[in-house]
Amino acid sequence: MADTVAPAVGQAAPTPPPAGLAAESRAVGEVLAAAVDHLRRLQDKQGWWKGELQTNVTMDAEDLLLRRFLGILRPDQLEEAARWIRSQQRDDGTWGTFHGGPPELSTTVEAWVALRLAGDPAEASHMAKAAAYIRASGGVESTRVFTRIWLALCGLWHWDDLPTMPPEMIFLPRWFPLNVHNWACWARQTVVPLTIVNTYRPVRPLPFGIDEIRVQRDASASAPPWTWGGFFQRLDRVLHAYSRHPIGPLRRRAIRRGLTWILARQEADGGWGGIQPPWVYSLLALHLSGYPLDHPVVRAGLEGLEGFLIREETPTGWIRRLEACQSPVWDTGLAVTALLDAGVAADDEAVLRATDWLLDEEIRVVGDWSVRRPSLAPGGWAFEFANDLYPDTDDTAEIVLALRRVRHPEAARLRAAIDRGVAWTVGMQSTDGGWAAFDVDNTKTLATKLPFCDFGAVIDPPSADVTAHIVEMLAVEGAAGDLAARHGIRWLLDAQEPDGSWFGRWGANYVYGTGAVVPALVAAGLDPSAPPIQRAVRWLTEHQNPDGGWGEDLRSYRDRSWAGRGTSTASQTAWALLALLAAGEHAGEPVRRGVRWLVDTQRADGTWDEPEFTGTGFPGDFYINYHLYRIVFPISALGRYVTAQAGAQS
């Protein structure tokens, strides 16, 4: 790849840069070329990219418990998954939700139970250390509801001691609080099957107990009845009483309606929503309702889960782990953008293969989003291989940003898909001017107060990162002056934090949010010298690490003092650089130092090490290490840096 841009015929050649800058330019060009070569090698022959979506060992523990409950757990599966779970235990005996993060109680309990299932004795050193942490942290009694649901399935917890959710909630009309469409799409797909599981209250005991991780604490006192917590505690008692003596015909009809709802949402790959929670709970609900394991629906669901498994040979033997989700559409859109940012031709063979695959993945059917937008025509893209019922605005914006730059032989086909995606995304704008990922105006917080909802986000309000990607998409499509974009810009300006940063919902965290918003606002016409941009630039430069990179620990979601603080990572350094470059800071020392960090830390194979998790599933609760982030975002940042430097020298 050339390090400089050749002058046009008849145009004077630019003044050569100083020797130091020329050497730096060559180094950046070499790093960029190596990274592009690495990314090319990762492309599937069908055209897509997919990096591993790494989470934590609860996925593996729950997979083992599911298979044990269904009677299909094989010894080799148990051994390989247990080997992986052991490998993730830290020196203090605990497990966490992200690399380098603090111990996490529920994760440690689920790992401990899975290893007991695998035959690890409770008195073994690694098990005793885990149990000591669990007891010191309040015991199994202090774990989240979802952990105790798995324990109840295995006879290690009483169903009576869990919050209940009746299946009759499926009948709640759309105007009534807590109807299924007031939950985020991922939450409603989880809650509906869980109401059925909760009705049957099944128990299939494991051959061991959990006395080692109990503390036998007294039941918590009830909150005052005039608080939401107190109200729902008392409502839960009423619902428990009803569950013991339900109205039979109504209960049976509710279960049938719930099963119909579940069956209607099974995807082509056999799963539900492309993510683990609704997938496994839907399988459990169907199984408990009489669907045999060889029923086509259940069989498809179980076979689909196999595609989420990763097996690797290690020095200690084979290990097996489960992805909570897969991100090929998202990864492919980002990869195309990265290649184009790096100067790869718009009709390059790899780019065209990816474009063809993405065009085939366009969603042309309606899903749950149509409940609030019944007249909106379908369009856009989802995150996974198969999730036609739940496209999302964030994927759609990023894919439009990539595809509009492609020189495709079927230009009309490409343009039509882009136009449908833009129109659908505009139609998904919330009334406050922002965009959420999956739903419109999914902002009612009542569900978050339920005793059942002590883990993860259960609603889908607009966020700065998603809104920014859509505003940027509209801007480059020439619609920055349209009403939708203007409302989105106003939403972003109002959402800026007092320190100049923006909160990042789907990536860690303020670095991600700021890295998304600044390029969007500049693309939409905001002058880089404007105060909101300059406050963001100042925040980024103040949070640059001494080594030149940027990093932000995921603890910033719980503790604001961690905002912008953490070990430097390739993806977060790239996010900061993308913002600074958009703000016209390409010649500044912070950008030079950030670029130098990427140059100095590149591996010999062209990528970067990044054990840190920089993706977010549920802020404060569930995090992701997107393995492709460490390559696509640095390529984009370095590519845009080279372009900016070349433009400054011409």
Image (tube, grey):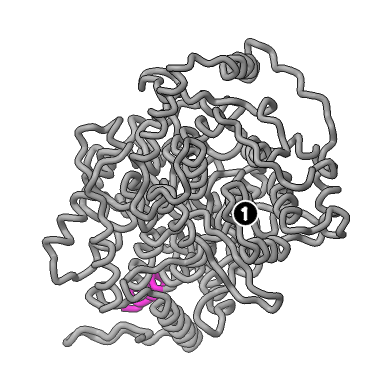
Question: What secondary structure do most residues of the magenta stretch adopt?
Answer: helix
Residue closest to the eye, 418 or 324: 324
Query: How many numbered markers are drawn?
Result: 1
Q: Does any portion of residue 517 appear in the rendered image?
A: no
Q: Is residue 229 magenta?
A: no
| Quadrant in the picture for residue 455 | top right
The residue drawn where x is 39% and y is 56% is 384
Across and down, in percent, residue 87 comes to 71, 65
Q: Which residue is mark 1?
A: 64
Residue closest to the eye, 204 or 3: 204
274 to 588, vertically: above or below: above
The residue drawn where x is 24% and y is 45% is 365
Q: Does any portion of residue 212 appear in the rendered image?
A: yes
| Quadrant in the picture for residue 117 | bottom right
Residue closest to the eye, 95 or 397: 95
Residues in magenta? 639-650
